[in-house]
Image (cartoon, helix red, strand yellow):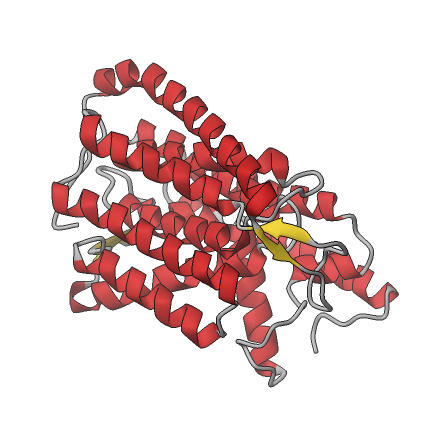
Amino acid sequence: MHGVRYIVHPTLAALALPRHLALFTGLAMFSAAVVRVMIAVGVPDRPDARKAHTRTTPKSGGIGIVAAFLLGIILLYRYGQVSRLASPLFLGVIVAAILIAAVSFLDDIYDFPFVVKLGAQLVAALAAVAVGLSARRFDLPLLGPVHLGLAAPLVSTLWILFVTNAMNFIDGLDGLAAGTTLIACLFLAGIAGVHGGFFVYTTSLLLAGGVAGFLPFNYPRARIFMGDVGSQFCGFLLSLLGIAATHYEHVSLSFMVVPLLLSGVLLDVIFTLVRRAIAGHGLAQAHRGHLYQVAHRAGMDARLIAIVYWGFAIFGGAVVVAFTHLNGNAKIAIVFAPFLPFLIWLGVVDAMAKRAGITIWG
């Protein structure tokens, strides 16, 4: 981000905390009000063979998340004192957020082919990168700073596309994507606040507020789905916050904060894409082969599956916190810790699938 740093005296952040908590609560209430409206007028999502729900349910509840976030970020731009960015970058966040929300809402209505979705996401990602929302370097444990140089825009764009689609792919059961996003945002806000990344801190709270207003309508039994406008929007913003997190001062794990928080989601998506590629299946073809979908097809309660993925996010947050208190080789070891619960989950799902006559490998 052109060398922009977000360091603010901790006392200022402490003074701003009550206002930020009030803003979080207000945005959650505003989001909930918009979601109530969308329950009445939202785009109907009808059941089919690749969906988990069995009755027509409105979608596009993510409009509540979008509306709350945009209200919050505009207020932050106009009145924020602690969490400032240079105006071009701040406006870039707002414009990119509006762009991804608009195209994903249209996707909810018209159900675009994947290539059209990807093209629209690419435009939004390029808009963000063009104004400077690009990771210039990765601070890796033990290795120190790794400068990306000319590869920075490409790496940043691919990262944005991957996380945006990962959250979209994972939004298939009640509360799974929304709960994971909420937990990731709260951890990210806390970590960023402690380490001086106050734009990331405040922006995470804004997104968390919007999701908190939506989640009660989506879990434990969905009265509305977030739709692509919600899942793509959440993934897009989390990817941007991941880029912003690479600009923390004095923190050597910044590159890994968001990947660790989203480890369950990202590992599920990576495993599924690799498995389907090896099996010769089309990666853009609709399917129900993600681990969470296989677990549900094998008989596991959807509410429990959502809790498992929330647990991945909590575990990832604990790993990030632990990382900051470790030294030497222990830092490297802790980074790989999220693979352990994922491998356990993989084993559980595989065993359930075999009993149900389903394969997770084909």
Residue 15 occupies quadrant: top left
Most foreground residue, 43 or 15: 43
**Is 40 or 321 nearer to us in this picture?**
40
Q: What residue do we see at 21% from left, 38% from top?
A: 249
Query: What x and y, as percent, mark residue 42?
Result: 56, 49
Q: Could you tell me if residue 334 is visible in this image?
A: no
**Relative side of 172 to 252, left or right:** right
Q: Is residue 93 in sight in this rendering?
A: yes
Q: Residue at x 45, y 29 (%)?
A: 30
Image height of 46 relative to 359, above or below: above
Provide residue 97's location: percent of width, then percent of height. 32, 50
Q: Return the residue found at the far bottom.
A: 280
Is 123 located above or below residue 79 in the figure? Answer: below
Rendered position, 1 above or below 287: above
Q: Is residue 121 left or right of residue 82?
A: right
When asked about the image quadrant of residue 312, the answer is top right
Q: Position of residue 151 (x, y in %)?
A: 21, 68
Q: Quadrant of the C terminus?
A: bottom right
Query: How many numbered markers are drawn?
Result: 0
Task: Give coordinates of residue 235: x percent, y percent.
Answer: 44, 52
Name of the residue lying farthest toward the front: 41
In the image, residue 227 above or below residue 308:
below
The residue depicted at 63 percent of the width and 41 percent of the height is 218
